Image: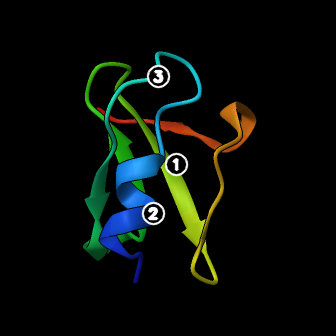
Amino acid sequence: MLSSELLDILACPICKGTLTLLEETSSLLCLHCGLTFPIRDGIPVMLVDEAERIS
């Protein structure tokens, strides 16, 4: 899905924290903010308006 090099470069747009790849939901998770950012067609959508809060 995403290369490890790209995952190393990406950061949460809010807190600049580390993101974790969630392959089962095709998203990136920021544990600090509690948000997931979708991955669409292999491209991470790092827009705050597109993020979803985890429960």
Label 1 and label 2: CA atoms lie apart by 15 Å
Residue 29 vertical position relative to residue 48 in the rendered view, above or below: below
Label 2 and label 3: CA atoms lie apart by 15 Å
Label 3 and label 1: CA atoms lie apart by 13 Å
Which image quadrant: the C terminus?
A: top left
**The one of 21 and 26 positioned closer to us in this rendering:** 21
Choose the circle earlier in sequence order: 2 or 3.
Answer: 2
Crowding near the residue tagged with mark 1, few <14, some 14–19, many ≥20 C-alpha atoms within 10 Å:
many
Residue 14 picture location, percent across and down: 56, 19
Residue lying at 40% horizontally and 83% vertically, measured from the top left: 1
Asked whether the residues under the numbered discs 1 and 2 touch, taking CB atoms below 8 Å apart as contact, a structural biologist would say no
Residue 34 vertical position relative to residue 3 in the rendered view, above or below: above
* Drawn side of residue 18 relative to residue 10, left or right: left
* Drawn side of residue 26 relative to residue 41, left or right: left
Residue type highlighted by circle 3 = Lys
Choose the circle earlier in sequence order: 3 or 1.
Answer: 3
Residue 10 picture location, percent across and down: 48, 46
**The one of 47 and 50 positioned closer to us in this rendering:** 47
Residue type highlighted by circle 1 = Phe
Residue lying at 46% horizontally and 37% vertically, measured from the top left: 11
Residue lying at 38% horizontally and 76% vertically, measured from the top left: 3
Choose the circle earlier in sequence order: 1 or 2.
Answer: 2
Which residue is identified by label 3?
16
Crowding near the residue tagged with mark 2, few <14, some 14–19, many ≥20 C-alpha atoms within 10 Å:
few
Q: Secondary structure at mark 3?
A: loop
Residue type highlighted by circle 2 = Leu
Q: Nearer the viewer, mark 3 or mark 1?
A: 3
Which mark identifies residue 6? 2
Which residue is identified by label 1?
37
Residue 27 vertical position relative to residue 11 in the rendered view, above or below: below
